[in-house]
Amino acid sequence: MLQMQFRSVSRVPVSSRTQVVRVAAAKGGFGGAVRKVAPRVKHEQTVMEPCPCASGKSYKNCCQAVHTGKSSADTPEATLRARFAAFAKGQADYIIGTTHGDYHIHHYQVATPGGAEERLREDVAGACNKFAFTGLKIVSNEPGVAEHEGYVSFEYLSRKRSVPGAPVPEEELRDTAAWSRTAERCRFVRTSSGAWQFVDYNTITLPANMLPEAATPAAF
């Protein structure tokens, strides 16, 4: 079992393999709180633009179909990858739709499942505008106690956008010291409809033998 350790926000070179940082709570579990930012700027997509989920496929031939409802994510890992790509691409509807109602209760302290959708939508939009996400590395998949439960541990890179909602310029991609490395363990449950939804998360410290190879920042 992975040891859970909460860390403060910090910036480290992406080459560091010994320190895992916790980025602002806004991005935790891919659905947190950053507010009052400019509308997201949509940048032009090309057929060969790589998918942020790190599948090696183009976005058009990968998570775009999931985000538009033409296909579905049928495992916790596939759902995690699609949610990560949705944050990178500003696809708030997909993130909202794959967030379990219990997250609203625990995170926003509301009385009913799904009772904070507007607050969640605002927070998701804020995170998409303020931060760039890349370098996703899946570390492990674990079954839950129940058959309908699963956990995914992963690592990724993030940084603040110099212009909210705009792609990260090439010179900022090369500024590796500005990228923060974060590791999380997310819990997913399968609903009665068969869809997997994100419920909650913890930031984690990965043992040295579980650290993936360093990622190279890419613009999304």
Image (tube, rainbow, N blue to C red):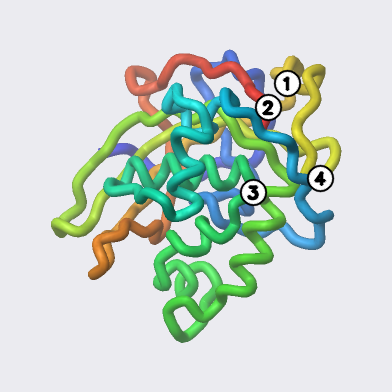
Which of the marked residues, 4 or 3, is nearer the chain's N terminus?
A: 3
The residue carrying mark 3 is: 90
Q: Is residue 20 visible?
A: no
Which of the marked residues, 4 or 2, is nearer the chain's N terminus?
A: 4
The residue carrying mark 2 is: 219
Label 4, residues with CA under 10 Å away: few <14, some 14-19, many ≥20 = many
Q: Secondary structure at mark 2?
A: loop
The residue carrying mark 4 is: 164
The residue carrying mark 1 is: 173
Q: Position of residue 76 (x, y in %)?
A: 31, 47
Q: Secondary structure at mark 3?
A: loop
187 left or right, relative to 127: left
Rounded to the nearest angstrom, the CA distance separating label 4 from label 1 is: 15 Å
Picture residue at 39% right of the left edge, 61% below the top:
199
Which of the marked residues, 2 or 1, is nearer the chain's N terminus?
A: 1
Picture residue at 49% right of the left edge, 30% below the top:
136
Q: Residue furthest bottom?
A: 111
Task: Give the residue type that dot 4 points to.
Answer: Pro
Q: Nearer the viewer, residue 8 or 214?
A: 214
